[in-house]
Image: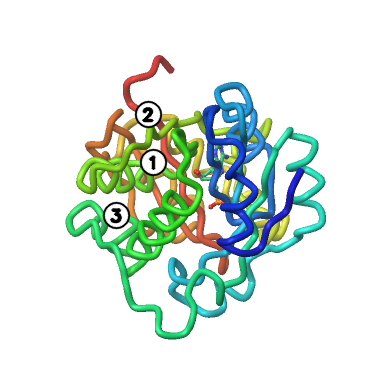
Amino acid sequence: MIVTRTVADVRAALAGRRDGTVGLVPTMGALHAGHLALLAAARERSDTVVTSLFVNPAQFGEPADLNGYPRDERRDLDAAREAGVDVVFAPSAAEMYPPGYQTWVEVTELGVTLEGEHRPGHFRGVATVCLKLFLIVRSELAFFGQKDAQQVDVLRRMVADLELELQLVVVPTVRDADGLALSSRNVLLTPEERRRALALPRALATRDPETARAILEASGLEVDYVAVAPFDPPILAAAVRAGSTRLIDNVPLDEER
Ligand code: AMP
């Protein structure tokens, strides 16, 4: 496994691998079994698997959220190696946004609803970093989790609008045995907050927005939104806060219970 830190180095690492399919798995590190499912899907469908580890400052609002985001690169590199990754791209913020940087991508409508409404600028940061990663790696495939369904919807729009020659592959949400969707942020929950957070998958499993809202409000979680979103597939999505940790989750509405 080759670990690269600069755009020039990741391009050089990929130069000899262009005759096969390249698959990209963008992550912010703190890898868990959800990320591993993406890497496994990428390994199955690609000759070369590239993963990025980059906590993208541009998609965070609160500095405290960015500073408190879990980071453990040594563990991530072990997990990536174990998952059969060929090339890791782990740039610094200055590599991705050098002094003078001023070009941004906005998905103007899909990017300002739901998550975008509660996290202004979030999808501008996501779309920009993903476009940069797509152009740097030039993969045929990019793998994303259904857990972040609106991110998938925003990126699909960007790929279509900008005529990118890239296929997005969506991987189902991986959950803990108790139903909580895996998230790098789960380690920030106290045991009591984690217990309360179980109301989130329980509420969404009702597949009914009013019932879900009632369950969430009774659980002591702060509700940012609960809504049916007209993505492909349509989902029931919610965002809540347990203490200072914000959690999102969704269930596709086209599946059997
Ligand atoms: P993150 O590191 O949180 O930015 O996530 C990187 C990728 O992993 C995104 O495409 C996420 O949607 C995906 N992902 C995160 N959590 C899960 C999960 N529990 N199941 C499946 N995919 C996930």
Q: Residues within 10 Å of mark 1 (few under 14, many from 20)?
A: many
Residues 124 and 113: in front is 124
Please report contact status of discs 2 and 1: CB closer than 8 Å, yes or no.
Answer: yes
Alpha carbon distance from label 2 to label 3 = 16 Å
Helix, strand or loop at label 1? It is helix
Instruction: Tell me the residue that label 3 is attached to.
Output: 114
Look at the numbered disc 2 and say if its residue's Cβ is closer than 8 Å to ligand 1.
Answer: no
Q: How is the image coloured?
A: rainbow
Which quadrant is the C terminus positioned in?
top left
Q: Which mark is residue 42?
A: none
> Where is 170 relative to 135, above or below?
above
Please report contact status of discs 2 and 3: CB closer than 8 Å, yes or no.
Answer: no
Q: Residues within 10 Å of mark 3 (few under 14, many from 20)?
A: some
Instruction: Tell me the residue that label 2 is attached to.
Output: 252
On screen, residue 230 versus residue 250, left or right, reads: left
Alpha carbon distance from label 2 to label 1 = 9 Å
Residues 135 and 16: in front is 16
Residue 218 x, y percent position in the rendering: 45, 50
Whether residue 171 is visible here, answered yes or no, is: yes
- Which mark is first along the chain, 1 or 2? 1
**Mark 3 belongs to which amino acid?**
Leu
Residue 212 x, y percent position in the rendering: 37, 40
> Where is 190 relative to 166, above or below?
below
Looking at the rendered image, the disc whose residue lies closer to the viewer, 3 or 1, is 1
Helix, strand or loop at label 2? It is strand
Whether residue 185 is visible here, answered yes or no, is: no
Residue 58 x, y percent position in the rendering: 44, 70
- Which mark is first along the chain, 3 or 2? 3
**Mark 1 belongs to which amino acid?**
Ala
Instruction: Tell me the residue that label 1 is attached to.
Output: 149
- Which mark is first along the chain, 1 or 3? 3
Residue at (67, 49) in percent of width and height: 88
